[in-house]
Image: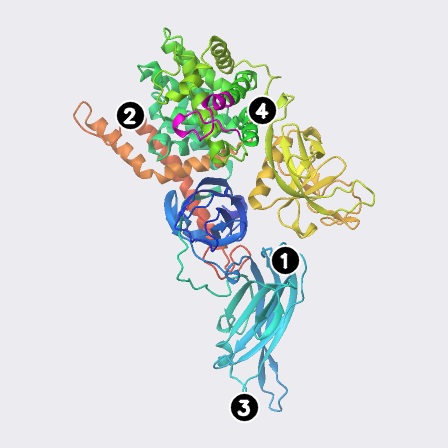
């Protein structure tokens, strides 16, 4: 299998926990925050924690990594922008800390140690006549600086040039320095400049100022990259070159050889290793999960996929492939998430939920405990709600959360925590109004609940009612336990964990959300008991609960639960068809003026963008008047823009009927998220383009195809040109199968233990033989394990062959594998680093 036929996807989940023993500032304690970087590119920033040497950040980043990187770094800053230090981990070393919390020492840093990028060089020794009467031969070193890639931006710009230095001689006392021309405003400069260094050999008179070729080969070539900035001047190799150091390459001449041309890419490296000072900078607690997935063509997964999709028909279901996956996984969520995607994608989610529900109900005698534990069923429903319900959730609770952040009103009702001068009754009134807003939003949204959630809730309710026909409240309990306990309440408590952007770091706001979350969580008891405050630990919450325990609130809640657990919905009443727009994504982007005015300047400006289920809009800043609105139906394609168009990274284009809007994201993660969500909301547009121009129209022609007609048809097929139909979500089934294969492969020892247990039960049937795991039906379980082994081993053979092919195709010094760093991509199957 060729490497080009395999899709490589990488994802990172990192929890930034807390720091301890941070150094005191000269002016006392200041607020601190952390930033997460790929090399020198910031992709995430925590909120600031006020004045503490032991700050707790408690934030988590999760996202796909769309580009190569060498180091994952977490910088600790003192507000506003003073760097205290950093934790930096090589990419290949991330596996040491996979899925474990670890304390890392914070190290200091200097400008000359912070580098990224690579340089392309051609090197060759040539022989030439030196002009002496005896026709002796001299040597000449030819150094061609071809180009660079991914140089860092310094102070908002990158104007690079290269300095080429040759040092040789017995004690390296001979040195020649040359430099390239300056390239402006680019992080990928094309130099294509050659330099010649004449290396004279000893003549017959043995001139002591000349050197043997052995002396030359003991020398060193150094190529350093600099950013020209007039305000900064640094002494470089005895001469004054204005600029900021970007990185360098040191190549021993003995590695060049004296025959063929050496044509290679090199990683840029720091100028020197910074010596650690005696000052302790403290430490930072991180939990890192980094994974690389190599996704094969779909037919490789068919056998294992079919085995999983048949799980709902296996008797007992504990012998099914899906159930076995959950049993061997260390974390149920790891198994539940890809399973939900697979079953939902193939239209069999309701069937597997129905089988799992019947299995759990048969083992439950008390209806009050039904679906309350952490099982495969409950984790799959949790995963489903987060997969399809986040826009619905944001539509319901974000307006109230935004109001709480804006009002900043105290809602503390615990007398023991009440600040001096505040009144419990006043705070209770404010808190009750917020709860009422959310309550009305939820109970009035039954017809907007996503259809997959309604179908699952209907299945659970019907299964529970069949098994407990005399327990009238069970029809509400099974649904409210999921939608309130596992969906609304956690989202109110931690909006950022449910992709609801909000500024809730203030302690007072967090406390208000905690009290509202407690109240919403208790709504489930309102439909199943006479007193929902029964067994309540916090007495101060009872008066608040009493406000919502009347018949009006109870009826509204029961009506809502009945609606969302009825699979027949009004198709016109969905969250996407409401007059009130639902926020899907927002943030700061840099846009190029669209040139509506004939003589207007097409410059770049920073704008606040807001994407809803109806349109894409932008504003001068958040809260300002709207400057432009683009209906989703007018987005004909969303594609990356070639960097050469404006010599800017992370640019993409939003193509409309009459023009394209060119936009720049802040980093690679932000770019990918905008591209993904914009593509999804515009994928089914009737007038979606088939072709587009991957570069901009500048100076009267398209840079990509040299066409001169600005309104001509594109020259490149758009991504995802065939829209996905009849599917609730754009799910990558093959990637989900690769995740499942990786889980089975990582737990082969547990699968073997289960197989041994099944064999023992068959041999010692009826005897008192203990087995390490509980097996309900040893025969069917044994047969299923055999099938799982066959599929997993077959897939792993494909991965092994792929690794061999990659190793055979691998070329050290290529653009993909530069010389000078050990952070090379693994070529395995699914690699959990």
- The local secondary structure at tag 3 comes to loop
Q: From this viewpoint, which residue is outermost toward the front?
A: 421
Choose mark 1 or mark 4, whichever is in front: 1
Residue appearing at x 67%, y 64% in the figure: 182
Q: From this viewpoint, which residue is outermost toward the bottom?
A: 205
Query: Of callouts 3 and 1, which one flags the residue occurring earlier in the amino acid sequence?
Result: 1
Q: In terms of depth relative to the viewer, which is nearer, 563 or 305?
A: 563
Q: For mark 3, what is the residue?
A: 207
Span highlighted in magenta in the image: 409-431
Asked if labels 4 and 1 touch by Cβ distance under 8 angstroms, the answer is no
- The local secondary structure at tag 1 comes to loop
Residue appearing at x 37%, y 47% in the figure: 102
Q: For mark 1, what is the residue?
A: 158
Q: Is residue 296 magenta?
A: no
Asked if labels 1 and 3 touch by Cβ distance under 8 angstroms, the answer is no
Q: Is residue 426 magenta?
A: yes
Q: For mark 2, what is the residue?
A: 779
User: Which picture quadrant has residue 795?
Assistant: top left
Query: Of callouts 4 and 2, which one flags the residue occurring earlier in the amino acid sequence?
Result: 4
Asked if labels 2 and 1 touch by Cβ distance under 8 angstroms, the answer is no
Query: Of callouts 1 and 4, which one flags the residue occurring earlier in the amino acid sequence?
Result: 1
Please tell me the numbered disc located at residue 341.
Answer: none
Q: In terms of depth relative to the viewer, which is nearer, 340 or 516?
A: 516
Image coords of residue 775 (percent x, y): 27, 26
Q: Tell me the CA gap for discs 4 and 2.
A: 39 Å
Choose mark 4 or mark 2, whichever is in front: 4
Query: Of callouts 3 and 2, which one flags the residue occurring earlier in the amino acid sequence?
Result: 3
Q: For mark 4, what is the residue?
A: 726
Choose mark 1 or mark 2, whichever is in front: 1
Q: Tell me the CA gap for discs 3 and 1.
A: 46 Å
Mark 3 neighbour density, 10 Å: few (under 14) some (14–19) many (20 or more): few
């Amino acid at each position: 299998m060729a490497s080009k036929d395999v899709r490589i996807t990488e994802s990172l989940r990192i929890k930034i926990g807390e720091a301890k023993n941070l150094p005191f500032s000269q002016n006392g304690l200041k607020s601190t925050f952390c930033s997460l970087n790929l090399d020198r590119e910031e992709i995430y920033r925590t909120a600031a924690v006020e004045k503490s040497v032991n700050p707790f950040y408690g934030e988590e980043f999760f996202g796909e990594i769309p580009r190569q990187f060498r180091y994952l770094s977490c910088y600790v800053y003192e507000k506003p922008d003073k760097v205290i230090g950093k934790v930096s981990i090589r990419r290949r070393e991330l596996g040491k800390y996979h899925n474990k919390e670890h304390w890392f020492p914070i190290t200091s840093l200097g400008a000359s140690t912070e580098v990224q990028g690579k340089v392309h060089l051609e090197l060759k020794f040539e022989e030439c006549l030196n002009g002496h009467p005896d026709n002796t031969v001299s040597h000449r070193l030819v150094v061609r600086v071809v180009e660079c890639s991914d140089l860092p931006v310094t102070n908002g710009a990158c104007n690079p040039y290269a300095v080429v230095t040759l040092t040789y001689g017995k004690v390296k006392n001979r040195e020649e320095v040359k430099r390239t021309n300056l390239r402006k405003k680019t992080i990928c400069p094309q130099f294509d400049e050659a330099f010649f260094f004449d290396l004279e050999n000893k003549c017959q008179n043995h001139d002591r100022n000349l050197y043997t070729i052995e002396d030359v080969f003991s020398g060193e070539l150094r190529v350093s990259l600099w950013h020209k900035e007039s305000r900064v001047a640094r002494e470089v190799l005895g001469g004054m070159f204005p600029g900021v150091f970007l990185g360098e390459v040191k190549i021993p001449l003995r590695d060049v050889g004296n025959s063929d041309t050496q044509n290679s890419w090199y990683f840029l490296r720091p100028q020197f290793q910074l010596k650690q000072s005696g000052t302790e900078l403290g430490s930072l607690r991180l939990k890192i999960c980094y994974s690389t997935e190599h996704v094969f063509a779909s037919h490789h997964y068919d056998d294992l996929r079919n085995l999983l999709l048949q799980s709902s028909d296996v008797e007992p279901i504990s012998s099914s492939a899906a159930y076995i996956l959950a049993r061997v996984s260390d974390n149920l969520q790891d198994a539940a998430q890809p399973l939900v995607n697979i079953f939902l994608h193939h239209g069999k989610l309701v069937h597997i939920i129905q089988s799992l529900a019947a299995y759990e109900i048969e083992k439950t005698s008390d209806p009050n405990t039904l679906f309350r534990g952490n099982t495969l069923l409950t984790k799959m429903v949790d995963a489903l709600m987060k997969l399809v319900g986040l826009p619905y959730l944001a539509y319901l609770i974000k307006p109230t959360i935004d109001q709480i952040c804006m009002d900043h009103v105290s809602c503390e009702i615990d007398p023991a925590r009440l600040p001096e001068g505040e009144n419990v009754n006043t705070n209770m009134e404010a808190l009750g109004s917020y709860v009422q807003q959310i309550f009305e939003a939820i109970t009035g949204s039954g017809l907007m609940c996503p259809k997959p959630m309604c179908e699952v809730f209907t299945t659970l309710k019907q299964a529970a009612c069949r098994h407990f026909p005399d327990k009238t409240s069970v029809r509400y309990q099974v649904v409210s336990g999921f939608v309130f306990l596992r969906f609304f309440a956690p989202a109110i408590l931690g909006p950022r964990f449910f992709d609801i952007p909000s500024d809730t770091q203030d302690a007072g706001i967090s406390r208000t959300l905690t009290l509202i979350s407690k109240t919403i969580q208790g709504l489930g008891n309102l439909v199943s008991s006479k007193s929902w405050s029964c067994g309540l630990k916090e007495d101060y919450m009872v008066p608040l609960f009493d406000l919502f325990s009347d018949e009006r609130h109870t009826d509204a809640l029961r009506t809502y639960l009945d609606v969302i657990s009825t699979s027949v919905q009004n198709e016109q009443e969905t969250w996407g068809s409401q007059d009130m727009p639902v926020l899907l994504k927002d943030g700061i982007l840099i846009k190029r003026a669209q040139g509506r005015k004939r003589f207007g300047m097409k410059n770049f400006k920073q704008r606040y963008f807001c994407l809803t289920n109806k349109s894409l809009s932008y504003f001068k800043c958040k809260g300002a008047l709207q400057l432009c609105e683009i209906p989703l139906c007018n987005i004909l394609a969303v594609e990356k823009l070639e960097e050469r168009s404006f010599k800017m990274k992370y640019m993409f284009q939003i193509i409309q009927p009459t023009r394209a809007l060119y936009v720049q994201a802040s980093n690679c993660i932000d770019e990918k998220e905008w591209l993904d969500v914009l593509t999804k909301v515009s994928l089914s547009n009737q007038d979606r383009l088939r072709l587009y121009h991957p570069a901009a129209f500048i100076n009267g022609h398209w840079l990509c195809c040299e066409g001169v007609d600005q309104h001509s048809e594109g020259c490149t097929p758009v991504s995802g040109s065939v829209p996905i139909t009849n599917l609730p979500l754009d799910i990558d089934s093959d990637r989900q199968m690769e995740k499942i294969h990786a889980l089975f492969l990582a737990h082969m020892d547990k699968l073997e233990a289960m197989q041994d247990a099944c064999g023992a039960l068959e041999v010692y049937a009826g005897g008192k033989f203990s087995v390490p795991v509980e097996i309900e039906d040893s025969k069917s379980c044994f047969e299923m394990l055999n099938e799982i082994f066959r599929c997993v081993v077959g897939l792993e053979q494909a991965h092994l062959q792929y690794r061999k092919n990659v190793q055979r195709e691998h070329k050290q010094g290529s653009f993909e594998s530069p010389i000078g760093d050990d952070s090379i991509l693994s070529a395995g199957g699914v690699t959990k680093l």
